[in-house]
Image (cartoon, rainbow, N blue to C red):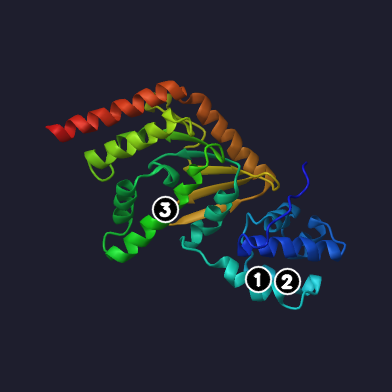
């Protein structure tokens, strides 16, 4: 396993806490597993805190200060690291996503946030919150589009998405918005920036029928799995649990259309929606 990278403490509050946690733990002569034991977390969890792929919650900060004798440093600083523009159930996953080298995602209902257009994202948020104010929706859309800046790098992260055919058939925002959203996905595929497959209805039952799953791998931290439902999410770091979801994703990808066949279907459905608008 590669050694830990040198974190830049100025890059983010989480990077600062991670770098300081690693320094304090090593000064105390503790392994990640030894520090994790009294916190009732795994050594992998401590590694993710140190790598900046997980936020440090106040309850852990208090215990870490006590165990490592750091005079309240982590309590004082964890609040800044915990601030997020994302909903509470997704904040930790969004922060981990920004550090991932590989992201694999199965999407059963909607185009994933990283691939959404502004109009599509706006339609999604209005559907979720039909009585929200314009300001609230604007803020949610802005945060979602900001996440997509991850794709401005031509190579990192590797993004591999399996879309259920239901994603293509659901006209979120109407035919014109859905057509534009699918064209956007197709354009990213044609630029070789993302890998996209479609799981057709004809595939029948499959290993990920339980819902959406996002898998994230990192350069210097154990992988994570994120499971999301309606207004709820769970970030998993247990190796056995992550491995189960990795297998489910692999089985779904094996049942999906090839990338070439998937692109043809995505563009065909987009064209159908465009013709529908012309009628």
Quarter of the N terminus within the rendering:
top right
Residue at which label 1 appears: 59
Q: In the image, 219: left or right of 107?
A: right
Residue at which label 2 appears: 63
Q: In the image, 92: left or right of 199?
A: right
Going from the N terminus, do you reach mark 3 or mark 2 first?
Answer: 2
Look at the numbered disc 3 and give the secondary structure of its residue.
helix
**Which residue corresponds to the image point at 48% horizontal and 35% vertical from the top-left?**
161
Q: How far apart are marks 3 and 1 (CA)?
A: 29 Å
How many other residues sit within 10 Å of disc 3, few (<14), some (14-19) or many (≥20)? many
Residue 237 position, x and y percent, is 65, 50
Residue at the far bottom: name it.
71
Q: Residue 144 carries which label?
A: 3
Q: In the image, 218: left or right of 274?
A: right
Quarter of the C terminus within the rendering:
top left
Q: Distance between the residues labelled 3 and 2?
A: 34 Å
Look at the numbered disc 2 and give the secondary structure of its residue.
helix
Nearer to me, 272 or 20: 20
Residue 121 position, x and y percent, is 34, 50
Label pair 2/1, CB-CB below 8 angstroms: yes
Residue 27 position, x and y percent, is 85, 65
Closer to viewer: mark 3 or mark 2: 3
**Which residue corresponds to the image point at 46% horizontal and 63% vertical from the top-left?**
85
Q: Distance between the residues labelled 2 and 1?
A: 7 Å
Closer to viewer: mark 3 or mark 1: 3
């Amino acid at each position: 396993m590669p050694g830990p990278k040198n974190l830049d403490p100025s890059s983010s509050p989480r990077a600062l806490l991670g770098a300081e946690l690693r320094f304090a733990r090593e000064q105390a002569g503790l392994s990640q597993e030894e520090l994790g034991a009294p916190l009732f977390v795994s050594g992998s969890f401590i590694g993710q805190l140190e790598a900046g792929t997980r936020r440090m919650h106040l309850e852990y900060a208090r215990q870490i200060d006590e165990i490592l004798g750091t005079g309240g440093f982590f309590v004082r600083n964890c609040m800044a690291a915990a601030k997020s523009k994302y909903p509470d159930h997704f904040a930790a996953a969004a922060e981990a996503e920004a550090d991932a080298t590989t992201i694999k995602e199965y999407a059963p209902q909607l185009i994933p946030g990283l691939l959404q257009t502004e109009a599509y994202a706006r339609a999604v948020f209005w559907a979720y919150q039909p009585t929200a104010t314009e300001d609230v929706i604007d803020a949610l859309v802005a945060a979602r589009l900001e996440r997509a800046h991850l794709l401005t790098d031509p190579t990192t992260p590797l993004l591999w998405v399996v879309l259920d055919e239901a994603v293509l058939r659901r006209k979120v925002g109407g035919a014109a918005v859905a057509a534009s959203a699918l064209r956007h996905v197709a354009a990213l595929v044609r630029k070789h920036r993302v890998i996209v497959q479609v799981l057709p209805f004809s595939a029948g039952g499959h290993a990920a029928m339980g819902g959406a799953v996002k898998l994230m791998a990192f350069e210097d931290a154990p992988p994570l799995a994120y499971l999301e439902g309606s207004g709820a999410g769970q970030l998993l770091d247990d190796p056995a649990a992550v491995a189960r979801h990795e297998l489910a994703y692999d089985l779904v990808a094996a049942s999906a259309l090839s990338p070439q066949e998937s692109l043809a279907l995505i563009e065909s459905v987009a064209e159908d929606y465009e013709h529908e608008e012309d009628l």
